[in-house]
Protein backbone atom coordinates (compact mmCIF):
# COMPACT_ATOMS: atom_id res chain seq x y z
CA UNK A 1 0.00 0.00 0.00
CA UNK A 2 1.25 3.45 -0.89
CA UNK A 3 1.96 6.16 1.63
CA UNK A 4 -0.83 8.39 0.25
CA UNK A 5 -4.16 7.28 1.70
CA UNK A 6 -7.60 8.81 1.66
CA UNK A 7 -9.24 9.59 4.99
CA UNK A 8 -11.83 6.84 4.44
CA UNK A 9 -9.13 4.24 3.80
CA UNK A 10 -7.09 5.43 6.78
CA UNK A 11 -10.10 5.14 9.11
CA UNK A 12 -10.89 1.70 7.72
CA UNK A 13 -7.33 0.49 8.37
CA UNK A 14 -7.32 2.04 11.86
CA UNK A 15 -10.53 0.16 12.74
CA UNK A 16 -9.04 -3.13 11.55
CA UNK A 17 -5.86 -2.42 13.53
CA UNK A 18 -7.88 -1.87 16.71
CA UNK A 19 -9.93 -5.03 16.15
CA UNK A 20 -6.80 -7.15 15.77
CA UNK A 21 -5.99 -7.78 19.42
CA UNK A 22 -6.53 -10.57 21.95
CA UNK A 23 -9.54 -10.53 24.25
CA UNK A 24 -8.90 -9.03 27.70
CA UNK A 25 -8.14 -11.39 30.57
CA UNK A 26 -11.09 -10.13 32.64
CA UNK A 27 -13.43 -11.09 29.78
CA UNK A 28 -12.19 -14.69 29.95
CA UNK A 29 -12.98 -14.69 33.64
CA UNK A 30 -16.39 -13.09 33.05
CA UNK A 31 -17.46 -15.72 30.51
CA UNK A 32 -16.08 -18.49 32.74
CA UNK A 33 -13.47 -19.37 30.08
CA UNK A 34 -16.10 -20.26 27.43
CA UNK A 35 -14.53 -17.72 25.08
CA UNK A 36 -10.79 -18.35 25.20
CA UNK A 37 -9.43 -16.40 22.25
CA UNK A 38 -10.39 -13.89 19.58
CA UNK A 39 -11.61 -15.94 16.59
CA UNK A 40 -11.34 -12.92 14.29
CA UNK A 41 -7.64 -12.38 14.97
CA UNK A 42 -5.69 -11.65 11.78
CA UNK A 43 -2.00 -12.03 10.94
CA UNK A 44 -0.82 -9.52 8.34
CA UNK A 45 1.02 -12.10 6.23
CA UNK A 46 -1.59 -14.86 6.23
CA UNK A 47 -4.95 -13.13 5.83
CA UNK A 48 -5.27 -10.02 3.71
CA UNK A 49 -8.01 -7.44 4.12
CA UNK A 50 -10.63 -7.26 1.39
CA UNK A 51 -10.08 -3.59 0.55
Image (tube, rainbow, N blue to C red):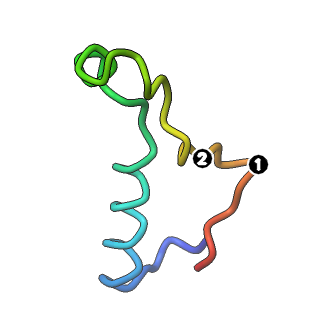
Q: Quadrant of residue 49?
A: bottom right
Q: Is residue 2 above or below residue 32?
A: below
Give the CA distance from mark 2 to mark 1: 8 Å
Using a 10 Å C-alpha cutoff, classify the residue at mark 2 as few (fewer than 14 neighbours), some (14 to 19) or many (20 or more). Answer: some
Q: Is residue 17 left or right of residue 44?
A: left
Q: Secondary structure at mark 1?
A: loop
Residue 24 in the image: x percent, y percent?
30, 24
The residue drawn where x is 50% and y is 71% is 3
**Circles 2 and 1 in contact, beta carbons < 8 Å:** yes
The residue drawn where x is 65% and y is 48% is 44
Which of the image's four quarters has the N terminus?
Answer: bottom right
Q: Is residue 20 above or below residue 25?
A: below
Q: Is residue 22 left or right of residue 43?
A: left
The residue drawn where x is 48% and y is 36% is 38
Residue 15: mark in rendering: none
Residue 50 in the image: x percent, y percent?
63, 75
Q: Is residue 35 above or below residue 41?
A: above
Please name the residue that numbered disc 1 is placed on: 46
Residue 31 in the image: x percent, y percent?
30, 24
Name the residue nearer the viewer: 47 or 10.
Answer: 47
Residue 27 in the image: x percent, y percent?
27, 24
Q: Is residue 44 above or below residue 8?
A: above
Name the residue nearer the viewer: 9 or 20.
Answer: 20
Q: Quadrant of residue 33?
A: top left
Q: Secondary structure at mark 2?
A: loop
Please name the residue that numbered disc 2 is placed on: 42
Amino acid sequence: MGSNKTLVMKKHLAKKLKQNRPIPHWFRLKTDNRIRYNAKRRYWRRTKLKL
